[in-house]
Image: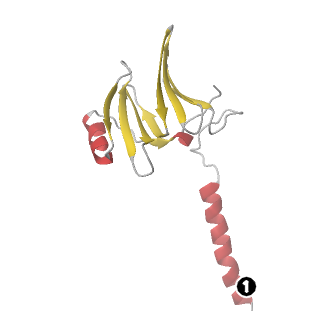
């Protein structure tokens, strides 16, 4: 009877431990300012850019330098990253299709766009962009 109990308990303990590891916050978890919500926050991208998330669907990439302010709407933004020269992101076009884009930070222009991941990865390599796209939850969130 003891063996049956141990055999029954061990998988439950393992499952509970794996669930805890998977769902708990890790050390790498990003900062979330108190009051931010998954549909209303700002991600700071360097000194002059922010990503303003205003709903589950809508985001705006905002450039602000003194009185110069420009904004680009990006619907269904999924992943993001940046370096000193470029901002990269992916967005949902539909259930099966993603759009991958590269923005040059100095001009704010979209310099590359494709729906093919392999082509996007090649372009990243060609431009020496050594960043991978990350889910928005991996970045620090601030109140708008």
Residue 86 percent location from the top left of the image: 37, 28
Is residue 69 positioned above or below 34 on the image? Answer: above
Residue positioned most to the top = 67
Image coordinates of residue 53 in percent, x first then y, are 57, 32
Q: Residue at (39%, 21%) from the top-left corner?
A: 108
The percent position of residue 5, horizontal first and vertical second, equals: 73, 85
Q: Quadrant of the N terminus?
A: bottom right
Would residue 71 be seen by someone viewing this image from the given angle?
Answer: yes
Residue 72 vs residue 141, the one in the foreground = 72
Residue in the image at 35% along x and 23% along y: 109
Determine the residue located farthest toward the left in the rendered image. Answer: 126
Q: Quadrant for the C terminus, please.
A: top right
Is residue 48 visible in this depiction of the protein? no
The coloring applied to the image is secondary structure
Task: Please tell me which residue lies in front, 62 or 24.
Answer: 62
Camera-side residue of 21 and 114: 114
Seen at 54% across and 41% down, the residue is 138
User: Residue 87 placed where, x, y %?
Assistant: 40, 30
Q: Counting other residues with Cα less than 10 Å from the Cα at mark 1, is it few (<14), some (14-19), or many (20 or more)?
A: few
Give the residue pinned by disc 1. 5
**Which residue is the extreme one toward the right?**
1
SS label for mark 1: helix
Q: Nearer the viewer, residue 61 or 22?
A: 61
């Amino acid at each position: 009877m003891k063996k049956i109990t141990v055999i029954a308990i061990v998988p439950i303990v393992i499952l509970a431990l794996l669930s805890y590891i998977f769902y708990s916050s890790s050390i790498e978890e990003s900062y979330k300012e108190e009051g931010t919500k998954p549909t209303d926050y700002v991600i700071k991208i360097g000194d002059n850019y922010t990503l303003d998330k205003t709903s589950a669907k809508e985001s705006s990439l905002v450039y602000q330098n003194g009185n110069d302010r420009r904004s680009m709407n990006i619907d269904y933004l999924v992943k993001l990253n940046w370096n000193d020269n470029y901002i990269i992101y992916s967005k949902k076009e539909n259930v099966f299709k993603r759009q991958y884009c590269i923005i040059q930070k100095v001009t704010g222009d979209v310099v590359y766009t494709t729906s093919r991941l392999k082509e996007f990865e090649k372009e990243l390599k060609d431009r020496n962009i050594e960043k991978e796209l990350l889910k928005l939850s991996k970045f620090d969130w601030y109140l708008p």
